[in-house]
Image (tube, helix red, strand yellow):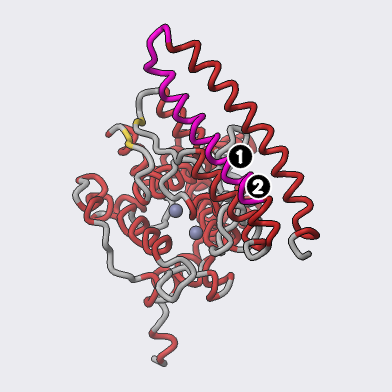
Amino acid sequence: MSKSLKKICWSVTLFLILNPIISVLALVLYLVFSNSYHLSEVLWITLFGLVFAILTNLSITMGYHRLWSHKSFEAHPLLEKILLFISAGAFQGSALKWASDHRIHHRYEDTEKDPYSINKGFWHAHMGWMMKHETVSLPIHAPDLEKNKWVKNQHDYYGIWSIGVGYVFPMIVGAFLGNAFLGLVIAGGLRIFLTQQSTFLVNSLSHTLGNTPYSTELTAKDSIIVAILTHGEGYHNFHHTFQFDYRNGIKWYHWDPTKWSIQLAYVLGLAKKLKTVQFSEILKARLQTETEKFYNSKFYEEKLLPVKERIIQSQIRFEQLKSEYKTASRERVDIIKAEMELTRIELKMNMKKWSVLIKAAPQLASI
Ligand SMILES: [Zn+2]
Ligand SMILES: [Zn+2]
């Protein structure tokens, strides 16, 4: 075998290529040539496949990514087991391996050591890295996760877990809905393909398409389009800047179903200790990014910098008052409320000044 062929990880490569081809072919041939199915079975099984696809994606984004890779919240053992069970059927490797690789991606983003570095091309970041031993077979280093009995079990018996959940389970549900074969092909093979592509886009498209509001040093980008395609993982510039925050889309209306699912789990008592970054830190990163191209100008020193400092100070003060308010005595409550209102007005005024200055900066900073 030639050297380049030896570099290929054939088991993963063949699975990634053959699973969608065989699934599509089997489905088309069956629908065209078989007369042993009813249209209602196709519809019900497709509906189940779609729901299962959404749950599979959420188990990866909520479980593999935000829970095990970043520990951005703590999950109840029941939720942990549900997430481990469903995610096994995604055919994206065990939670332990996935999280270990992902931590390397964050630690060495865009460098030679980043297993799915976008600097090696879109295809490499999307799927190519899984087809090479060099990048897909990195040693596992996640001692905290190895101590987790269920995570370890899913890793040690991944073959049984993945085939069981990924193919056998949808086949059984399909049988209950009237057609085991369609269950296997639609909610098994095709669903696996769809959910894999959604996750792969996080490594490729969200390092390619979008804005960089929190850090221009990273290739990770924020994009609503990618967020829609990836269950909320498209606010990737924010995520790479503040990786321990359980949210990726920080505003309540940002499209982040993974964040909403974690919030729902919290309400149901299935998640606790949701980690968030202080808003003053987020604001600081945003203002810094907006001004970095004007750093060496007089305009920055004299106009932008003082307003920037006032905004951040007001925000920090506001956050302090907010936490004081929670434990304040009755007599102090009204004083704190008034101070909060004043700080909010100050913040608003300075933000208005800031937007005027930022608009004028390209002309005035060059004088
Ligand atoms: Zn991450
Ligand atoms: Zn990334």
Outermost residue toward the bottom in this view: 2
The residue positioned 51% from the left and 54% from the top of the image is 199
In the image, is residue 280 above or below residue 303?
A: above
Label placed on residue 255: 1
Residue 21, visible in the rendered structure: no
The residue positioned 29% from the left and 53% from the top of the image is 160
Label placed on residue 151: none
Towards the viewer: 156 or 165: 156
Question: In the visual, does 330 lie left or right of 363?
Answer: left
Question: In the visual, does 170 lie left or right of 194?
Answer: left
Q: Tag 1, which secondary structure?
A: loop
Amino acid type shown at disc 1: Trp
Towards the viewer: 233 or 81: 233
Residue range highlighted in magenta: 304-331
User: x%, y% of residue 154?
Assistant: 27, 50
The residue positioned 65% from the left and 54% from the top of the image is 290
